[in-house]
Image (cartoon, rainbow, N blue to C red):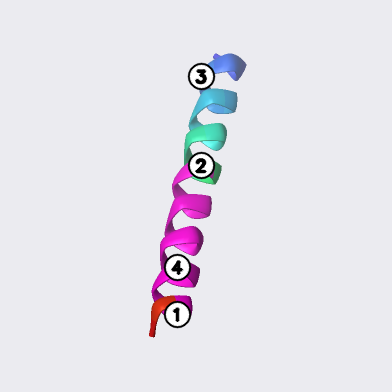
Amino acid sequence: MSQFFQELKRRKVLKTLGVYGAAAFIIIQV
């Protein structure tokens, strides 16, 4: 069960990094 939460946290982190990366990319482009 703990491994499930670890995977969930990891994916959430990856998604957050993706959002921040996309936002930074857009800001740089503008």
Residue placed under numbered mark 4 in the picture = 25
Q: Are marks 1 and 4 in contact (CB under 8 Å)?
A: yes
Depth check: 6 or 17 in front? 17
Name the element at disc 3.
Answer: helix
Spatial separation of the CA atoms under disc 1 and disc 4: 6 Å
Residue placed under numbered mark 2 in the picture = 14
Q: Position of residue 9 (x, y in %)?
A: 55, 36
Name the element at disc 4.
Answer: helix
> Dot 4 surroundings within 10 Å: few (below 14), some, or many (20 or more)?
few
The prevailing secondary structure element of the residues shown in magenta is helix
Rendered position, 26 above or below 16: below
Name the element at disc 1.
Answer: helix
Rendered position, 5 above or below 17: above
Camera-side mark, 3 or 4 = 4
Which of the two labelled residues, at mark 3 and mark 4, occupies the earlier sequence position?
Answer: 3
Query: Magenta segment range?
Result: 14-28
Q: Are marks 3 and 4 in contact (CB under 8 Å)?
A: no
Query: Residue at image x 54%, y 14%?
Result: 1
Spatial separation of the CA atoms under disc 3 and disc 4: 31 Å
Residue placed under numbered mark 1 in the picture = 27
Question: Does 16 appear in magenta?
Answer: yes
Amino acid type of the residue that numbered disc 2 sits on in the rendered structure: Leu
Query: Residue at image x 38%, y 85%?
Result: 30
Q: Which mark is residue 4?
A: 3
Name the element at disc 2.
Answer: helix
How many dots with numbers? Answer: 4
Spatial separation of the CA atoms under disc 3 and disc 1: 35 Å
Amino acid type of the residue that numbered disc 3 sits on in the rendered structure: Phe
